[in-house]
Amino acid sequence: MTQRPLITTRFDGSSTAEEVIDGIDLHGLRAVVTGASSGIGAETARVLATAGADGTLAVRNTTVGARVVDRIAASAGEPLVAVAAIDLADPGSVARFARDWDGPLHLLVNNAGLVTGGLERTKEGWELQFATNHLGHFALAWALHDALAQGARDRGTARIVSLSSAAHMRAPVDFDDIHFERRAYDPQIAYAQSKTANSLFAVEATMQWGAEGIVANTVNPGGVKTGLQRNFTQRQRESLDAAEAAGVFTWKTTGQGAATTLVAAVAPEFERTGGHYLDDCREAYTVPNDADLSAHPHGVKEWALDPDNARELWTVSLKTLNL
């Protein structure tokens, strides 16, 4: 398979978010990080604040979020960090967050993620992992588009970073039955589908908004022990243990997990280019759709970058959300 040269950086899988941000001044940059009450999101917000960014932690539990703000202030001095409520599975909550936003937005980090152990649905009947991991973030970016466009005019570019996972290799988006209304439910396949959707969103968002200076990229943070695993079924835990034993991935620290997010968010190599999938702080290589995850733990499936799939997902998402 012939590919163009991949975008690399001086960082790798062992790098930390603090190393990526070192020497970068983000004063004047306004950022929103979803799911920033713990784990990779909290570390992402903290490190952005140390460089001077004005951050908003978009979280479901604002009490917990406020504690994170206090910890950020303790480690980063007196940063401009706020907390705001959002439930990505609730379109009304997403709309309220966007209505309350005022002024430009330079960086949107779609970090929040959900794993379920069984079939759960929103009040609209949407499968919960897809609704939270993709539709909620799609609705948020859509609602904040004008703020991002203003941010791009201010600084020459605005960036969106969406967190995917190597799990995307397990399944494409099934456009015939996204919400498991006919096929048997498998939480691993549902999660994989949502992570593929995260990547496809970045592809089409860049196509739709790139001319305005808004670029979107997807990152795989790698294996990081966070609250995301609390709802894993026994089968999911056994699968993860087997992958670790086989060397498919090694556990990273939270700082290492946030590093690739920071590369997509602030590294000059990705300032004006989007639609890429990053792994270990650099653009990942593309592998065929029939490739085995265990053989390509740091690659990206063709289906996650396919422009036709990305366009179809964009259309389906608009229709689903009545946007």
Image (cartoon, helix red, strand yellow):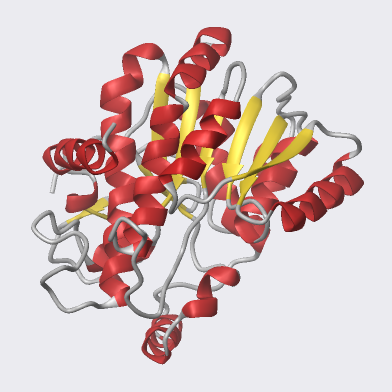
Residue shown at the point (57%, 12%) measured from the top left: 155
- Relative to 224, does residue 208 appear above or below in the rendering? above
Seen at 35% across and 71% down, the residue is: 120
Tell me, yes or no, if residue 218 can be seen here.
no
274, 207: nearer the viewer: 207
Residue 289, position as x, y percentages in the image? 14, 60
Question: Looking at the image, which residue sits at the far front?
Answer: 123
Q: Is residue 199 left or right of residue 287?
A: right
Residue 140 pos. (x, y %):
45, 36
Total numbered badges shown on the rendered structure: 0
Q: Position of residue 312 (x, y in %)?
A: 14, 40
Rendered-image quadrant of the C terminus: top left
Q: Is residue 115 left or right of residue 317?
A: right
Front position in the image: 115 or 10: 115
Viewer-side residue, 223 vs 130: 130
Q: Residue at x 47, y 50 (%)?
A: 88
> Where does the image place residue 257, in percent across and percent down from the top left?
58, 58
Determine the image quadrant of residue 53: top right
Can residue 281 be seen by looking at this rendering? Answer: yes
**Left or right: where does residue 157 sit relative to residue 185?**
right
Determine which quarter of the picture holds residue 127. bottom left
Q: Nearer the viewer, residue 75 or 19?
A: 75
Q: Residue at x 56, y 46 (%)?
A: 86
Q: Is residue 53 above or below residue 6?
A: above
